[in-house]
């Protein structure tokens, strides 16, 4: 496996890990919501994070389907997706903490 292919694979593995972590936190947020519903602001933030998660998941899936000759472009784009996933995860962690602190 050449270096670019290895980088592509590494970005995909890290991004998949971020997606899984976001999904787990969304489950916890839903559980917290079931115990004590959040106000409209928090619900809107959760909905926006969920939309962003699915958009990024779709973008990542499209990148994974790119031909090998586009590997360097995929590395660049997948690094961007990975960075946004990290940001979304941090936003969700803060929001989840707010939801949990209400109890």
Image (cartoon, rainbow, N blue to C red):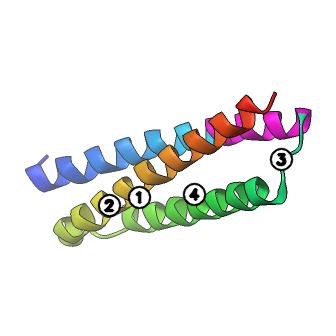
Graded by Cα atoms within 10 Å as few (under 14), some (14 to 19) or many (20 or more), the crowding at tag 2 reads many
Please tell me which residue lies in front, 8 or 32.
Answer: 32
The x, y position of residue 89, in whole percent, is 50, 46
The Cα atoms of the two marked residues, 2 and 4, are separated by 14 Å
What stretch of residues is rendered in magenta? Answer: 24-35
Marks 3 and 4: which is nearer the front?
A: 3
Q: Which residue is mark 1?
A: 84
- Select label 2 or label 4 by which is in front: 4
Q: Residue at x 56, y 39 (%)?
A: 93
Task: Tell me the residue at 38%/66% (across/down).
Answer: 63
Q: CA distance from mark 3 to mark 1?
A: 25 Å
Q: Quick one: SS at disc 4?
A: helix
Residue 74, by quadrant, is bottom left
The mark lying in front, picked from 3 and 1, is 3
Residue that mark 3 sits on: 38
Task: Name the quadrant containing residue 82.
Answer: bottom left
Which residue matches tag 4?
53
> Residue at (89%, 37%) from the top-left corner?
36
Contact flag, marks 2 and 1 (Cβ < 8 Å)? no
Q: Is residue 43 visible?
A: yes
* Sequence-first disc among 2 and 1: 2
Image check: 27 left or right of 34? left
Residue toward you, 89 or 16: 89
Task: Residue 39: say if magenta.
Answer: no
């Amino acid at each position: 496996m050449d270096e670019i292919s290895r980088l592509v694979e590494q970005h995909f593995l890290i991004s998949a890990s971020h997606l899984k972590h976001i999904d787990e936190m969304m489950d916890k947020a839903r559980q917290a919501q079931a115990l004590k519903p959040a106000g409209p602001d928090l619900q809107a933030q959760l909905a926006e994070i969920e939309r962003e998660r699915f958009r990024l998941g779709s973008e990542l899936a499209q990148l994974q389907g790119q031909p090998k000759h586009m590997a360097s472009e995929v590395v660049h784009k997948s690094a961007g997706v990975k960075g946004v996933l990290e940001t979304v995860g941090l936003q969700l962690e803060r929001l989840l903490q707010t939801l949990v602190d209400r109890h």
